[in-house]
Amino acid sequence: MKFLDGILKILKIVFWIVLIIIVIVILVSITHTKSNPTPNLAKLELKSMIINSDDMQRQIDRIKENPSIKGVLLEVNSPGGTMSGSIEIADLLRELHLPIVAYDAGVMASGSYYASIYSDYIVANRGALVGSIGVIFEGFDIENLLAKLGIQSQTLQAGEYKSAGTFTRQWTKEEKDYLQNLVNKQYDLFVSDVRQRRHLKDTSSTVFAEGKVFTAKQAKELGLIDEVGSKEDAIKKLLELIKDKNPKDAITKPVWLEKPKVENFRDILINNVSSKVLSTISSKVWM
């Protein structure tokens, strides 16, 4: 009996210790939540190959859930991606209706540049790269490889150009002409949007749209960005834009919207893997 009484006493002590710890954790959590100042700025990150707009949509939804947010810093370091995904992100930013300053931390090229053009101001790190304005459609021709392996491709189709872009044979001249026309139309859309948003309509020059990558200084001279500077410069400009839009919203102490403590690693992994697979084996309109 004495042994059982001892066990019960130990269990009671453990119970009270655990209960006290739980109460302390809850109190600390409540205190921390209450002590957190209301956020007035938010950061959006575009730092991988663009496949779709899902990740950006999630980030923007968080901003919309916080009406205290007065401005957004868009941090970009991306080589681009799909045409459709880039346009979706650009449209999401255009419809956010908040002052946005984009900061090129390394690479703002092709699709990631397209996605950024509806920012109110673009700042690029002096060592960053900007541009690569163009569209590419590519795919492999593995017909000879299949022949060596003794594999023959079989295709049934309805519609003359349904298999245009296939990797199991060479493309016909008609298919190449069709695909080139498609690429040209996508390219014209890209260039037209850049001209309009960056106020380049008055120049007939297409130097900025030859698929070249430029240094930050060159991009500034071409009108593709507004300033060569640091991240701090971008933040200062954002605060200026917020004040200019509405003096009542002027921010004296920036408080950034915190990221969720638990990130969805599954989505990140899937996006990274799918981007590598798509860029390696598929025919797609890329930027």
Image: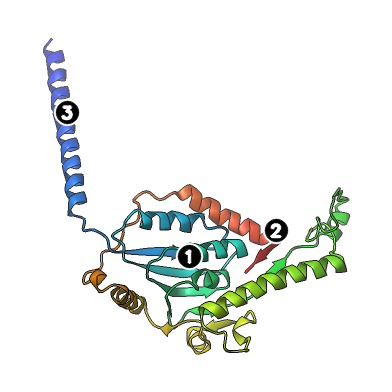
Residue 61: % across, % down: 41, 54
Q: Earlier in the sequence, mark 3 or mark 2?
A: 3
Question: Can residue 187 be seen from the camera position used here?
Answer: yes
Question: Are discs 3 and 2 less than 8 Å apart at CB?
Answer: no
Q: Secondary structure at mark 1?
A: loop
Where residue 14 is drawn, which disc sits there? 3
Q: Secondary structure at mark 3?
A: helix
190 in relation to 271, above or below: below
Are there few (<14), some (14-19), or many (20+) residues within 10 Å of tag 3? few
Q: Nearer the viewer, residue 88 or 272?
A: 88
Q: Quadrant of residue 144?
A: bottom right
Q: Quadrant of residue 13?
A: top left
Residue 69: % across, % down: 31, 62
Q: Earlier in the sequence, mark 1 or mark 2?
A: 1
Viewer-side label of 1, 3: 1
Q: Amino acid at mark 3?
A: Val
Are there few (<14), some (14-19), or many (20+) residues within 10 Å of tag 2? some
How much space separates mark 3 and mark 2, taking CA atoms? 60 Å
Where residue 47 is drawn, which disc sits there? 1
Label 2 sits on residue: 282
